[in-house]
């Protein structure tokens, strides 16, 4: 496009002026700059910027809220774990106590039964001892009679004369005693 | 062909006169309004669902918000956040206009000194007004650095004042010159292709591959410059605002 043609399109434009330095265009440019810039400023400061700020603030709030909630839930679950572990430990202790008690009770019962049995056996042992002693005594007295009789007949056979019963008994008794 | 033609402001709809100056709806105005509409549709459209888990578009909208918020907060502190809507508007406006300029046949609004100067002066006046309202005369401590020997203090103060006053100039010329130079360079290399083709015929069109490769590389560079200059413009605004908030050197 020819320079002249372009210049003729500008009413009042000085021919041959470098366009950025052509003062005849200044007024129009300034007016439209003012209109555009102020319009843009108002649109930005009233509409766009508050909206973007709200978006960013809401996001920050949501994120920090979620973080706090996560923290809260985590501490809750930590508490639950601690409570569970405490319950577990308590139950274990109780189980141990019950086991100990039962063991002791059973041991005591066994001991008692053992003692009763022992006593019964002792009684029977004593009875047996007594009957043995009685049997022995009666046996011994029988031995005494037999021995007296034997001694009497031996003496009678030896000396031909029946010895005095009393003396024979005494003699047998003294021999048996030794 | 003419590398300057692209900067021509064209009156699309004449609207009348304001004093001596004629006001018209121009291509510049169209691109400014297009930027406003596009950005508004993008930022509002991407955030309608207000999702906690953002979509790609919403993520991009939040990214721009956090990018500018971080930039402002790290240079001007928490108190600087009261200027956040202004800095955000400024950054997004300049960035979008810079990027629009890279579309072939588009008009780049920020390659006009009057636009960048108006924006830089707005920043300058906000800094001056806020500084004076907030700190009164203490605002002028800005020009008196601490720990400077009394002998050279007058000179330092003069330099500080000069650098403060020249801020809107450097602030606006930096953006304007970068955009202007980039677009002229692109246009010149594009012109080479036509020139080669029309003068040398087939050989010229084949040879035109070289300037074309140059254009591709330059366009990538200009994409970086478009972002970088918008960023520089915004971060300088942040630094100047920081001076208004904390004038103690």
Image (cartoon, coloured by chain):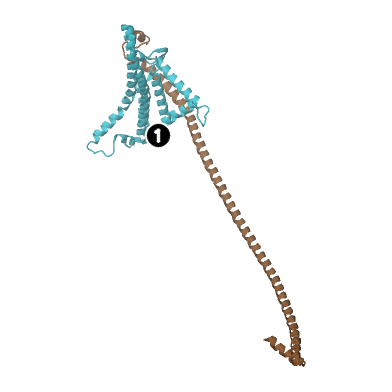
User: In terms of image quadrants, where is residue B107?
Assistant: top left
Left or right relative to B140: residue A122: right
The answer to whether residue B153 is visible is yes
Q: Chain of mark 1?
A: B
Q: Which chain is cyan?
A: B
Left or right relative to A22: residue A89: right
Residue corresponding to mark 1: B73
Q: Quadrant of the N terminus of chain B?
A: top left
User: In terms of image quadrants, where is residue B147?
Assistant: top left
Number of residue marks: 1
In x, y percent, where is residue B71? 39, 31
Residue sitting nearer the eye, A41 or B105: B105
> Residue at (42%, 18%) from the top-left corner?
B31
In x, y percent, where is residue B72? 39, 32
The answer to whether residue B118 is visible is no
User: In terms of image quadrants, where is residue B207?
Assistant: top left
Is B194 located above or below residue A117 in the figure? above
Q: Which chain is brown?
A: A
In x, y percent, where is residue B171? 33, 26
In x, y percent, where is residue A142? 75, 82
Q: Quadrant of the C terminus of chain B?
A: top left
Residue sitting nearer the eye, B53 or B115: B53
Is B105 located above or below residue B147 in the figure? above
SS under mark 1: helix
> Residue at (68%, 86%) from the top-left corner?
A177
């Amino acid at each position: 496009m020819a320079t002249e043609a372009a210049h003729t399109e500008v009413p009042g434009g000085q021919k041959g002026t470098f366009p950025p330095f052509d003062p005849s265009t200044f007024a129009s440019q300034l007016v439209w700059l003012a209109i555009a810039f102020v319009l843009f400023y108002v649109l930005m400061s009233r509409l766009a910027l508050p909206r973007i700020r709200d978006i960013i603030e809401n996001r920050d709030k949501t994120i920090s809220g979620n973080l706090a909630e996560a923290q809260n839930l985590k501490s809750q679950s930590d508490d639950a774990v601690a409570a569970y572990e405490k319950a577990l430990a308590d139950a274990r202790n109780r189980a141990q106590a019950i086991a100990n008690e039962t063991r002791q009770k059973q041991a005591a019962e066994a001991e008692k039964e053992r003692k009763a049995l022992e006593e019964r056996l002792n009684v029977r042992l004593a009875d047996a001892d007594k009957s043995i002693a009685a049997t022995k005594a009666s046996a011994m007295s029988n031995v005494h009679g037999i021995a007296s009789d034997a001694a009497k007949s031996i003496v009678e056979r030896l000396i031909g004369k029946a010895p005095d019963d009393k003396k024979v008994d005494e003699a047998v008794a003294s021999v048996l005693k030794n | 062909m003419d590398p300057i033609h692209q900067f021509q402001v064209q009156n699309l709809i004449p609207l009348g006169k304001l004093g001596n100056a004629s006001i018209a709806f121009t291509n510049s105005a169209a691109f400014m309004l297009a930027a406003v509409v596009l950005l508004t549709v993008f930022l509002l459209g991407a955030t309608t669902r207000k999702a906690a888990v953002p979509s790609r578009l919403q993520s991009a909208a939040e990214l721009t918000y956090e990018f500018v918020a971080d930039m402002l907060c790290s240079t001007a502190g928490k108190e600087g956040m009261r200027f956040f809507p202004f800095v955000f508007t400024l950054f997004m406006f300049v960035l979008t206009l810079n990027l629009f300029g890279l579309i072939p046949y588009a008009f780049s609004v920020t390659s006009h000194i009057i636009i960048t100067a108006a924006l830089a002066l707005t920043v300058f006046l906000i800094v001056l007004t806020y500084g004076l309202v907030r700190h009164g005369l203490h605002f002028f401590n800005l020009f008196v650095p601490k720990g400077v020997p009394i002998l050279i203090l007058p000179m330092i103060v003069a330099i500080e004042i000069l650098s403060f006053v020249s801020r809107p100039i450097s602030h606006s010329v930096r953006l304007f010159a970068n955009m202007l130079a980039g677009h002229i360079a692109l246009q010149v290399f594009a012109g080479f292709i036509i020139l080669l083709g029309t003068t040398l015929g087939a050989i010229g069109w084949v040879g035109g591959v070289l300037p074309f490769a140059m254009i591709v590389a330059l366009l990538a560079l200009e994409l970086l410059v478009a972002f970088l200059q918008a960023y520089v413009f915004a971060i300088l605004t942040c630094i100047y605002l920081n001076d208004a908030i904390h004038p103690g050197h």
